[in-house]
Amino acid sequence: MLEPAPFRGPKEYCYYETFDARCSDDEVILITSALYGRMRFGRCVKTNFGFMGCFTDVLSLLDRQCSGRHSCSVEVVEPTFDGVRPCNKELKCYLEVDYRCIRSTYIYVLFDVFQQTRGKLRALLVGIL
């Protein structure tokens, strides 16, 4: 059975910042959630220009770049999220992402199950972790 990872909770990464995920040598990254847009007021959005709550799920994009690796870095800039414009194009969006580190010894078994279930494993893993 998987060992529970400490809860981090999603964090905000403002425009021009970098999301850095790091796990120990015997663990790999599993992105559990990733949103891009203007979800709420906070560290990255301080002024109401009338466009709040516009966002899109970018889990698959972050999965491709980070999940299964020991570390990864993603810059929160336009080229990284090319074609993803959930809000008014004049406004800057931010990234909200959460991840867990899972022991890499489990990754081979999980990958096989993932292939067989065509992605349904994610909900199971997030529930366990």
Image: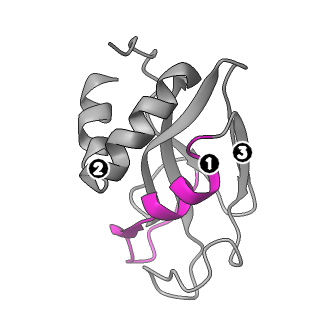
Percent across and percent down for residue 108 are 50, 33
Q: Mark 1 and 2 residues: CB-CB less than 8 Å, in contact?
A: no
Q: Which contiguous range is marked in magenta? A: 44-68
Q: Which residue in the structure is indicated by mark 3?
A: 72
- Quadrant containing the N terminus is top left
Q: Is residue 108 left or right of residue 68?
A: left
Report helix, strand or loop for mark 1. helix
Q: Where residue 90 is drawn, which disc sits there?
A: none
Q: Where residue 116 is drawn, which disc sits there?
A: 2
Q: Please, what is the three-letter code of the amino acid marked with disc 3? A: Cys
Percent across and percent down for residue 33 are 40, 47
Determine if the magenta segment contains residue 3: no
Q: Please, what is the three-letter code of the amino acid marked with disc 2? A: Gln
Q: Which residue in the structure is indicated by mark 1?
A: 66
Asked whether residue 45 is in view, the answer is no
Q: Distance between the residues labelled 2 and 3?
A: 26 Å
Mark closer to the chain start, 1 or 2: 1
- Quadrant containing the C terminus is top left
**Depicted 122 relative to depicted 105: above or below:** below
Determine if the magenta segment contains residue 50: yes
Q: Mark 1 and 3 residues: CB-CB less than 8 Å, in contact?
A: yes
Percent across and percent down for residue 52 are 37, 69
In this view, the residue in front, 75 or 128, is: 128
Percent across and percent down for residue 73 are 74, 49
Residue at point 54%, 20% (across, down):
105
Report helix, strand or loop for mark 2. helix
Q: How far apart are marks 1 and 3 (CA)?
A: 5 Å
